[in-house]
Image (cartoon, coloured by chain):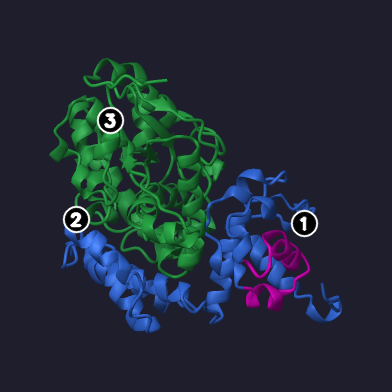
Amino acid sequence: MDSINLEAVRDEDFLRTVEKESGQNLSRCYQCGKCTAGCPCGPAYDMQVSQVMRAIQLGDKQAVFEAASPWLCVSCSTCTARCPNEIDVARVMDTVRHMNRREGGKHPTLNAFWDSFLKTVRLSGRAYELGVMALYMLRTGKVLTDMDLAPRIMPKRKLPFVPHVIRGKAAVGRIFKRFHDLRMDG
Amino acid sequence: MKLAYYPGCSGMGTSAEYERSTRAVCKALGIELQDLPDWSCCGSTPAHATDAVLSAALSARNLTIAAKTMAQSGATKFTTPCPSCLLNLKTARHHMAEPEFRAKVDAILDEPCPPIGQKGEEPLPDTYSVLQLLVEDYGLENIKSKVKTPLKGLKIAPYYGCLLSRPPKIMQFDDPENPTSMDRLLEALGAEVVPFPLKTECCGASMGIPRRDITERLSGRLIETAVRYGADMIAVACPLCHMNLDLRQEQAARAKNAVFDMPVLYFTQLMGIALGLKESDLGLNKLCVSPTQALQKIGKEVSA
């Protein structure tokens, strides 16, 4: 691992904000590595969970925000269940992506998927699966995504071709609008 | 037994058979489901990965409706079949116990959420999975007494997924690493439960679209292991697990350079079969991997 100049990278505010937003005491982590050992996404990570935890302790915001790992966390909470110091590690990973997003951080495909999903919720009040796929393809240009699944699922006649629009869709829309107006979305 | 019921969005689409079989089973058991009027999406993973306040607000709208529904209908508990909805609904209520967080959530809702407290006319209810209420409240002995076609001869790998029991402090259900509720339920139906070691290992969750390689690796491992343990099928309780294991089974097989033919059924479909319900009420024809051949083992003597 590369050496780092702590005086240069240490961002105390970053550490405190992660602790406050996640409600977790990060100084309890003693780097046992149990979270990393059980993480199903570890093989896809560029920085293992325990390394993310260490980088947060060090206040190394840049390293944490540049890592792909917090975006890729599937929130299975295996780390949380196994942490001997009762840190909700999955909530810390979630918090990191919330903070990163507010500062304009994005993952190329994950954010496109999440935003597509939430857009269908904002418009109709409920998630609309075919709509999510269409929006995702538009956003990413990956127009062949899951095309191999079409002949498997279409004959099952489960996917409606129009979204379920609820009566309270405007109320749901207002939740998103206030969230945006209060600048909670960055 | 009367329950306020939140179906969840996937029940209107990809998990239509879970929705249909849950309703059929509850009806057969005499459990009345009172639908939440005009429920909206809980936001699922996309909301909680985006922001905790947004996620809690999307859930809070539904918890508010649930509180009213329970007060008006006399339903005793609030339930959903979907673990992802369950996680968001439970987490929202859990986090809203912190006044500062609650204030942020209330600020983006039309009207503030009812209080969580024990007293008061419409307190914000906790949410329970259908599986939990069937096992803990309705009871396995009660279920067993209603079985018409025991699932004898069927070897099932019980797969719980991540969220039914994790994070443990919020979900408060069974063991986070080795849950046994579904095992015991399937045994009450007469099935043989194989000692499946990956009960709560992740299937890849919603990575199927944005990072299919992750889903293929994780789901492939689950199916391979079920095969190795001699399972005739996998039983699940989650629409997303089901999508990854059933709809995406060929993708996982290609990635593993294997051929899979592993039926994946919702536990409610298996309950329906054991209770003698009509196939059309259980949506067996909605499954991608056909269970027909595996189901023919029911009641057959197993040769040694």
Q: Does B62 sit left or right of A43 as displayed? A: left
Q: Is the magenta stretch mostly helix, strand or loop?
A: helix
Chain B drawn in what color? Answer: green
The magenta span reads A45-67
Q: Are marks 2 and 3 in contact (CB under 8 Å)?
A: no
Where residue B271 is drawn, which disc sits there? 3
Q: Which chain carries label 2?
A: A
Which chain wears blue? A
Between B152 and B79, the one nearer to me in the picture: B152
Residue at the spot 34% in from the left edge and 75% down from the top edge: A177
Relative vertical location of residue A154 with respect to residue A179 in this rendering, above or below: above
Q: Quadrant of residue A174?
A: bottom left
Q: Nearer the viewer, residue B56 or A74?
A: A74
> To which residue does mark 2 refer?
A156
Instruction: Determine whether the residue tagged by mark 2 lies in a helix, strand or loop.
Output: helix
What is the three-letter code of the residue carrying label 1? Ser
Instruction: Please state the horizontal and vertical placement of residue B167, each as a whole percent of the image.
Output: 54, 46
Frontmost residue, A61 versus A75: A75
- The amino acid beneath tag 2 is Lys
Residue nearer the viewer, A45 or B83:
A45
- Chain label for disc 3: B
Q: Name the residue under label 1.
A: A27
